[in-house]
């Protein structure tokens, strides 16, 4: 990208952001005016504890994403919750694929529902929409009516910190599950390849990994007499690159924290070392040459054909077409030439922005009581898998171990509860998550603890930017992220030589990477100082 083109893009982006800001400030109807036009909505007196929440049935509207398995009004979860609480919902549930677009149109039209559920509101959206008065603060409601959410805050103070906006209000609730805090899908070895090569000790360094990948390519581990094995496959690197960057000490391709200091990963010398390694794998055809072009279906087809040695996925079974078992080990994070210990990104164990109450909701007290049940031990378990016999059964006489009922359709749970394919507002207790036991589940937790958690670091905490900081980040990050992604592909494939590294760094500085780091450092410092 030439300097002139970059400046033109930045100017256009700034004008676009300014235009959006202007539009948001010239609303023809204030939130208070809109609320006065809700007409038939009436505020009902609620019961402080127990069920029902209201004695007289009320109806609220919900906006949420649908994964296409069932209509939400037909789900057992909502039917039983209505019986329990006396709160009925009308649903607007656009398909998950178009949900983000529909969400933006919803706020642009100002025709808001009473609540947003499973809505994945980003921190930037929360900042913008709360500033416009569309989302109401929740902290006083939580204090008065939500003992389970308060209990979660007490057990995980960082959750409360991470959902508290820069103006010290809480506008949304998260989905919290710390049983498997993967930052992205794990890497797995094809166990049959390891067995065929009599490999019992997994690689511990990048050089040992390179040697194993060469064996995958040349020693016919799938035993079909052809040299058709692909040592590593991926989709545009996004499903594997964070692992390989971690081998070289980079916690994120974007902004990350290194001993309290915020750095931008893609300009660090360790990132260059990662690119050099991946380019070598590409040149020697150890990395799939369809990585930057294939669909997920094409990738899975190669796995089902037993041609792949190393791959990313939430479990190896579907990819290899053999069902999940303990025969395919997770990749042990290896040490590169720039690291003493690898660093693998893990999640915060929560997904922010999954529940919000809008300013048109006439019964916020009843609403917060309704959602608080999903943060209780009983309510979260019901939201996940409902009653015994629905999707699970007891695996032992003492009723301590659960197992899923075999023979049910793959998507059966999604016909009963919204907790399928999306992040929903809840607090999943670790002991409940681990009560679903089978051979693979126990293997999965063990591998995760020993390989991911042992080397894990949250790249950057969930923090809120001030509105003026958000404006600056938006101006810079859109251009910067696209440029970094393009250059990652070009450097790995050799379309651009790494001899242009200095020019690559200079271009990022011209886009504004140093200012981006300054903003995130300030936000991180505020977060770290908050109790």
Image: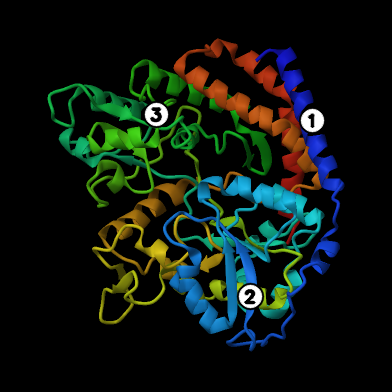
Q: From where the camera sits, is residue 203 visible?
A: no
Residue 254 lies left or right of residue 399; in this view the side is: right
- The residue indicated by pointer 1 is 14
Q: Nearer the viewer, residue 220 or 5?
A: 5
Q: Nearer the viewer, mark 2 or mark 1?
A: 2
Give whichever of discs 2 and 1 has the lower sequence position.
1
Whether residues under marks 3 and 1 lie with C-beta atoms below 8 angstroms apart, the answer is no
Question: Can residue 251 be spotted in the picture?
Answer: yes
Residue 234, relative to residue 384: is it above or below? above
Position above or below: 487 against 221? above
Find the distance from the CA under tag 3 to the CA under tag 2. 46 Å
Residue name at image x 77 percent, y 56 percent: 130
- Report the disc number at residue 59: 2
Q: Secondary structure at mark 2?
A: strand
Question: Which label is found at residue 168?
Answer: none
Q: Residue at x 18, y 24 (%)?
A: 219
Q: CA distance from mark 2 to mark 1?
A: 43 Å
| Label 3 crowd (10 A; few <14 / some 14-19 / many >=20) | some
Residue 15 vs residue 334, the one in the foreground: 15
């Amino acid at each position: 990208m030439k300097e002139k083109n970059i400046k033109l893009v930045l100017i256009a982006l700034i004008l676009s952001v300014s235009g959006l800001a202007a539009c948001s400030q010239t609303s023809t109807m204030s939130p208070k005016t809109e609320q006065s036009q809700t007409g038939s909505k009436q505020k009902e007196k609620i019961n402080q504890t127990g069920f029902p929440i209201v004695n007289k049935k009320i109806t609220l509207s919900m906006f949420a994403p649908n994964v296409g398995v069932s209509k939400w009004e037909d789900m057992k979860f909502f039917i039983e919750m209505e019986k329990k609480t006396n709160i009925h919902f009308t649903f607007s549930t656009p398909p998950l694929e178009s949900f983000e677009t529909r969400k933006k149109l919803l706020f642009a039209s100002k025709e808001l529902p009473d609540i947003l559920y499973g809505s994945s509101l980003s921190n930037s959206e929360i900042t913008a929409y709360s500033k416009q008065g569309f989302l109401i603060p929740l902290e006083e409601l939580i204090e008065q009516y939500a003992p389970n959410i308060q209990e979660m805050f007490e057990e995980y103070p960082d959750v409360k910190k991470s959902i508290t906006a820069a103006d010290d209000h809480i506008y949304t609730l998260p989905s919290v599950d710390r049983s498997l805090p993967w930052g992205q899908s794990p890497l797995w070895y094809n166990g049959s390849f390891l067995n065929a090569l009599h490999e019992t000790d997994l690689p511990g360094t990048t050089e040992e990994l390179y040697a194993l990948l060469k064996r995958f390519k040349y020693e016919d581990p799938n035993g079909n007499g052809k040299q058709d094995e692909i040592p590593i496959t991926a989709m545009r690197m996004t499903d594997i690159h964070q692992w390989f960057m971690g081998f070289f000490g980079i916690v994120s391709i974007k902004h990350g924290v290194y001993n309290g200091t915020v750095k931008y990963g893609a300009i660090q010398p360790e990132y260059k070392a990662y690119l050099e390694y991946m380019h070598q794998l590409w040149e020697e055809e150890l990395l799939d040459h369809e990585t930057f072009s294939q669909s997920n279906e094409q990738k899975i087809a190669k796995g089902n054909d037993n041609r792949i040695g190393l791959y990313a996925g939430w479990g190896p079974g579907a990819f290899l077409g053999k069902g999940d078992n303990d025969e395919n080990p997770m990749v042990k994070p290896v040490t590169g030439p720039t690291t003493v210990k690898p660093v693998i990104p893990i999640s915060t164990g929560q997904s922010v922005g999954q529940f919000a109450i809008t300013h048109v909701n006439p019964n916020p007290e009843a609403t917060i009581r309704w959602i608080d049940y999903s943060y209780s031990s009983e309510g979260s378990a019901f939201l996940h898998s409902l009653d015994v016999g629905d999707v699970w059964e007891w695996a032992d006489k003492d009723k301590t171990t659960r197992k899923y009922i075999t023979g049910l359709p793959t998507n059966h749970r999604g016909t009963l509860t919204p907790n399928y394919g999306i992040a929903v507002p809840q607090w999943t207790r670790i002991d409940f998550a681990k009560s679903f036991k089978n051979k693979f589940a126990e293997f999965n937790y063990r591998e995760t603890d020993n390989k991911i958690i042992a080397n894990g670091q949250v790249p950057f905490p969930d923090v809120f930017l001030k509105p003026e900081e958000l404006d600056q980040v938006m101006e810079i990050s859109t251009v910067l992220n696209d440029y970094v992604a393009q250059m990652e592909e070009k450097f790995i494939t050799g379309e651009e030589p790494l001899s242009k590294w200095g020019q690559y760094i200079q271009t990022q500085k011209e886009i504004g990477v140093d200012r981006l780091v300054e903003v995130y450092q300030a936000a991180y410092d505020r977060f770290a100082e908050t109790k």
